Amino acid sequence: MVTVIVPAALRGETSGAGRLDIAASGTLRAVFDEVAAGWPRLIRRIRDEQGELRRYVNVYVDGEDCRQTGGLDTAVPDGAEVQVIPSVAGG
């Protein structure tokens, strides 16, 4: 089981859930494929039309930035925590 932490800004896409328990593990791609099956509106905020991470979304697996550890091919072991953090712009 993998836990996906959903920030407040995206909880509207999960009916208010802040944590999603995902059975898939192995890679971040596999985890997000399962998220896509259960929460398609959420995954559209995380991945683009080609299935890649949107550039304004940061994803951490057990505290490590996935862009530094293989992107969607980052290893996600059973029991891991995946945190999704959208960039916030302001001025």
Image (cartoon, grey):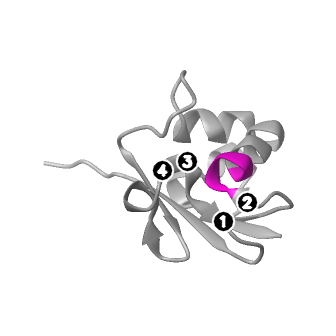
Mark drawn on residue 26: 2
- Disc 1/disc 3 C-alpha distance (Å): 10 Å
Image position of 50 with respect to 11: above or below: above
For label 3, the residue is 72
Q: What's drawn in magenta, residue-wise?
A: 27-31
Q: Earlier in the sequence, mark 3 or mark 2?
A: 2
Residue under the point 25% across and 48% down: 89
Q: Based on the picture, tell me whether residue 74 belongs to the magenta stretch.
A: no
Helix, strand or loop under label 3: helix
Question: Which numbered disc, 4 or 2, marks the residue that appears first in the sequence?
Answer: 2
Q: Is mark 1 in CB contact (under 8 Å) with mark 2?
A: yes
Of 66 and 54, nearer the camera is 66
- Hey, what amino acid is under mark 3? Leu
Asked if residue 48 lies left or right of residue 29, the reply is: left
Q: Position of residue 39 (x, y in %)?
A: 76, 41
Spatial separation of the CA atoms under disc 4 and disc 1: 11 Å
Mark 4 lies on residue: 71
Callout 3 crowding tier (Cα within 10 Å): few <14, some 14–19, many ≥20: some
* Residue at the image position 73 percent from the left and 60 percent from the top: 26
**What kind of secondary structure does the magenta stretch mostly adopt?**
helix
Q: What's the distance in space between the residues labelled 4 and 3, CA to CA?
A: 4 Å
Q: Earlier in the sequence, mark 4 or mark 1?
A: 4
Left/right placement of residue 23 relative to residue 45 reads right
- In primary-sequence order, the first of circles 1 and 2 is 2
Mark 2 element type: strand
Q: Does the residue at mark 3 contact the one at mark 2 (Cβ under 8 Å)?
A: no
For badge 1, the amino acid type reads Val
CA distance separating discs 4 and 2? 13 Å
In this figure, which residue is indicated by the disc labeled 1? 76
Q: Please name whichever residue, 73 or 20, is drawn nearer the observer in this view of the structure.
A: 73
Residue 77 image point, x, y percent: 71, 71
